[in-house]
Amino acid sequence: MNNQLVIMAKRPALGQVKTRIAARVGEEKALAIYQRLLNHTLQWTKPLRPVVYWTGSGHEPRHDFVSKEQASGDLGMRMSEAAVKELEIADGIVIIGTDCPELDEAMVQEAYAHLTHCDVVLGPAQDGGYYLIGMRKHYPALFNEMPWSSEVVCEETILRCRRLSLSVTILPALSDVDEWDDIQDVVHRQWLIS
């Protein structure tokens, strides 16, 4: 099966990334945290040869991947458009962001394996969203008019899959970094802001 990893990323720029964290610790520290998460994601995904869909007005860090521009609109519209484009040339796709430091290559490979026998793979985040979504076909209903940045995104996605009679595999729940309180343990915090 020909699978493609898609990374949805923002170009790092002061005041444009991790705004909820910035409200607590300032824009410079929030930018440093985002850059650490972004660089970590770009590093571990290298063997998977991802396509990075960028948004924002900052400068892209140096990398060897294919870069594309995200569509306009909310997160759902941007993810949906990326899915349409990549599924023109791939049998299956997995879409991730840059906010989940626990995510790794083995979990993406696991998602690819599940796509051989199910329609959708979801990696739930502990805050109610998801850190990964995989599919073999484009399902616009999974992206349209979704309550993004809320604690019901993953649950709503599963409900929509059921309404569409899609088979779904759920991966283990992981934490992602959206709020300062998401950086709970000291070791993790030092890694992100050192």
Image (cartoon, rainbow, N blue to C red):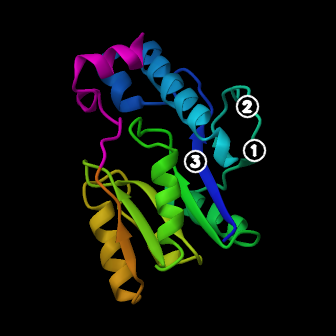
| Residue at 41 percent of width and 30 percent of height | 19
Quote the CA–CA distance across marks 1 and 2. Answer: 9 Å
Query: In the image, is residue 115 above or below residue 43?
Result: below
**Label at residue 58:** none
10 Å crowding of disc 1: few (<14), some (14-19), many (20+): some
Quote the CA–CA distance across marks 2 and 3. Answer: 15 Å
Residue 59 painted magenta: no
Residue 60 is at least partly visible in this image = yes
Residue 50 is at least partly visible in this image = no
Residue stretch rendered in magenta on the structure:
174-194
Q: Position of residue 21 (x, y in %)?
A: 34, 26
- Quadrant of the rendered image containing residue 82: bottom right
In contact (CB < 8 Å): disc 3 and disc 1: no
Quote the CA–CA distance across marks 3 and 1. Answer: 10 Å
Residue bearing mark 2: 63
- The disc, 3 or 1, on the residue closer to the chain's N-terminal end is 3
Residue bearing mark 3: 8
| Residue at 40 percent of width and 14 percent of height | 193
Query: In the image, is residue 30 above or below residue 38?
Result: above
* In front of the other: 23 or 142: 142
In contact (CB < 8 Å): disc 1 and disc 2: yes
Disc 2 marks a residue whose amino acid type is: His
Residue bearing mark 1: 67
Relative to 73, 124 lies left or right: left
* In front of the other: 151 or 162: 162
10 Å crowding of disc 2: few (<14), some (14-19), many (20+): few
- Which mark is in front, 1 or 2? 2
